[in-house]
Image (spheres, rainbow, N blue to C red):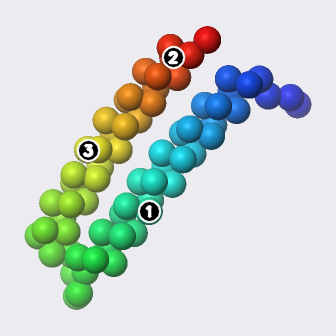
Amino acid sequence: MELERDTVREIVVSTLAVVLFVAAVVVIGATYTKDSLSSQGALALVGTIVAFVLLMGVVGFWLSRQD
């Protein structure tokens, strides 16, 4: 099974965005947690989720405009 170039690009870009999101969640968890997630940590986590959704929207739009 051979993948087209566009499909490989979509997989790579989407995987990088997800890895970036997971890394941000891990950093927030390590930074803002003692016994539980602090209110600043919760706000950072919500901001990260919003940024991820916006990033995926931009990535999807960008990928739809390629070739």
Q: Identify the residue at image location x=62%, y=40%.
A: 12
Q: What amino acid is at disc 3?
A: Val
Q: What residue type is labelled 1?
A: Ala
- The residue drawn where x is 64% and y is 31% is 9
Which amino acid, by three-letter code, is at mark 2? Ser
Q: Is residue 51 above or below residue 60?
A: below
Q: Do the residues labelled 2 and 3 touch (CB within 8 Å)?
A: no
The x, y position of residue 16, in whole percent, is: 54, 47
Q: Mark 1 points at which residue?
A: 23
Residue 43, percent across and down?
A: 15, 60
- Label 2 sits on a secondary structure element that is helix
Q: Mark 3 or mark 1, which is nearer the start of the sequence?
A: 1
Point out the image quarter for the C terminus: top right
Circle 3 SS class: helix
Name the spot of residue 51 as percent of width and height, x first: 29, 44
Residue 1, position as x, y percentages in the image: 88, 31
Counting other residues with Cα less than 10 Å from the Cα at mark 3, is it few (<14), some (14-19), or many (20 or more)?
few
> Which residue of the protein is positioned furthest toward the front in this rendering?
67
Q: In this view, does 45 lie above or below 32?
A: above
- What residue appears at the point 56 percent right and 38 percent down from the top-left corner? 13
Quadrant position of residue 45: bottom left
* 2 or 1: tag closer to the N-terminus: 1
Q: Is residue 45 above or below residue 8?
A: below
> Seen from this angle, which residue lies furthest right?
1
Q: Is residue 4 above or below residue 41?
A: above
* Residue indicated by mark 3: 50
Q: Label 1's element?
A: helix
Q: Please identify the residue farthest to the left as the structure is shown.
A: 39
Tell me which label, 2 or 3, sits earlier in the chain: 3
**Crowdedness near tag 1: few (<14), some (14–19) or many (≥20) residues, C-alpha within 10 Å:** few
Determine which residue is flagged by label 2: 64
For residue 2, what is the image quadrant? top right
